[in-house]
Image (cartoon, rainbow, N blue to C red):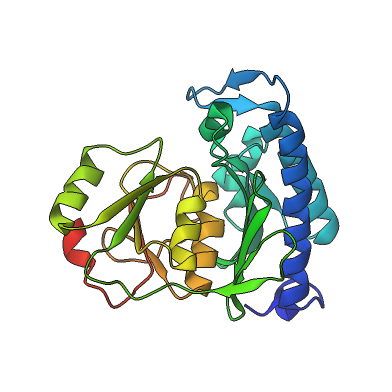
Amino acid sequence: MNANTLIDSRTDAELLSAVMDIARDASAAIMNIYASEFVVDHKDDNSPLTQADRAAHRIIADALQTLTPTIPVLSEESSPACHEFNIRKNWTQFWLVDPLDGTREFVKRNGEFTVNIALIHQHAPVLGVIAVPVTKVIYAGARGLGAWCSKPSQSMQPIATRRCDSTPVIVGSRSHGGDSLDEFLRRLGKHQLLSVGSSLKFCCVAEGSADCYPRLSPTSEWDTAAGQAIVEAAGGAMVDLSGQVLSYNRRESLLNPHFIVVGDRQFAWRHLIG
C-alpha cells in the first residue's frame, strides 16, 4: 500500500496508527456497555443487535469521516441505503467496518468479539485493524508494511504466519460449524482443532498460532476484510474454493463465497476443498 497516493500526505504507518486509535475508542465504548445490563434486539435475518454495535458504529464512522473526509465508510450498521450497489459500485476506495464482530459472543459474554476496520482500494483490503475489547489487544497490518500485535503495556510486536507441520492446527468458528467443516477435517486427517469466535480466527493464523481457517458457511464482506488484510500482510493468503483471492465490492450482494485462510502458502491445502 502507498498511503501517499491514497490518503492525502499521511504515511502508511501514521494512517495505521490513527485507525488503531479509533478501534481503541470503539472498544472502550463497547466495554462500557458490556459491563451493563444491555438489551438485545434482532435484525431481519434474526442476527442479534445491541447498543454496543450502534455505539461503536457511530464512533468509528464519525472518526473515519474526520480522518479521511473524501473516503466513504461502509459499515454493517450503516443505513440500508448505503448498502445498495448503485451507491457503492463506483467507489475505488472506501472503509469497510464491522463495529462489533461476534455479537453472539458479546451476548454470551465469552469475550471473543472484535472491532474490525479495513481500507479497501481497487477491490482489495490494503489495511486492516482488529481490536479485541476485552483484552485490549490489537492486530494490525498493511500491504507493504507488515503485520503487528499490540498488547497493553507492551510495544507493538511484528507477527508472521508459520510453516505448517505434520499436525496442522485448524481454527474454526465457535458459532458456525456444520457438515462442510466436518468433511474438510475428515479429508485433512490428523489435526488439532481450536474453536474461536469472531475475527480472532484470522488473528490466530496471522500470528502463527494456527495454520488454517476454513469458512464453509456464510459471511459478509465486513466480517473478513480487516482479517484478510492482516493475514496477507503477515505472509498468508485468503482464497475462495476455486483458489481465487477474495475481492470486495464487485457484486450487488455483500455476501462472501466460502473461503479458506492459510498461513503457509506452500502447503497443499487445495485437495481439501475439492
Image position, residue 58 (x, y; %): 77, 39
Q: Quadrant of the C terminus?
A: bottom left
Q: Can residue 176 be seen here?
A: yes
Residue 13, image quadrant: bottom right
Q: Which residue appears at 72% of the width and 29% of the height?
A: 35
Viewer-proximal residue, 108 or 70? 108
Image position, residue 191 (x, y; %): 23, 57
Residue occupying the far front of the picture: 153
Q: Which residue appears at 59% of the width and 81% of the height?
A: 144
Classify 91 as above or below 175: below
Does 128 sit left or right of 187 as displayed?
right
Q: Quadrant of the N terminus?
A: bottom right
Residue occupying the far right of the picture: 66
Viewer-proximal residue, 202 or 194? 194
Classify 39 as above or below 179: above
Q: Can residue 61 be seen here?
A: no
Does 148 sit left or right of 55 as displayed?
left
Image position, residue 125 (x, y; %): 55, 64
Image position, residue 14 (x, y; %): 78, 73
Classify 40 as above or below 263: above
Residue 156, image quadrant: bottom right
Q: Which residue appears at 68% of the width and 51% of the height?
A: 136
Residue 95, image quadrant: bottom right
Report the number of numbered marks. Answer: 0
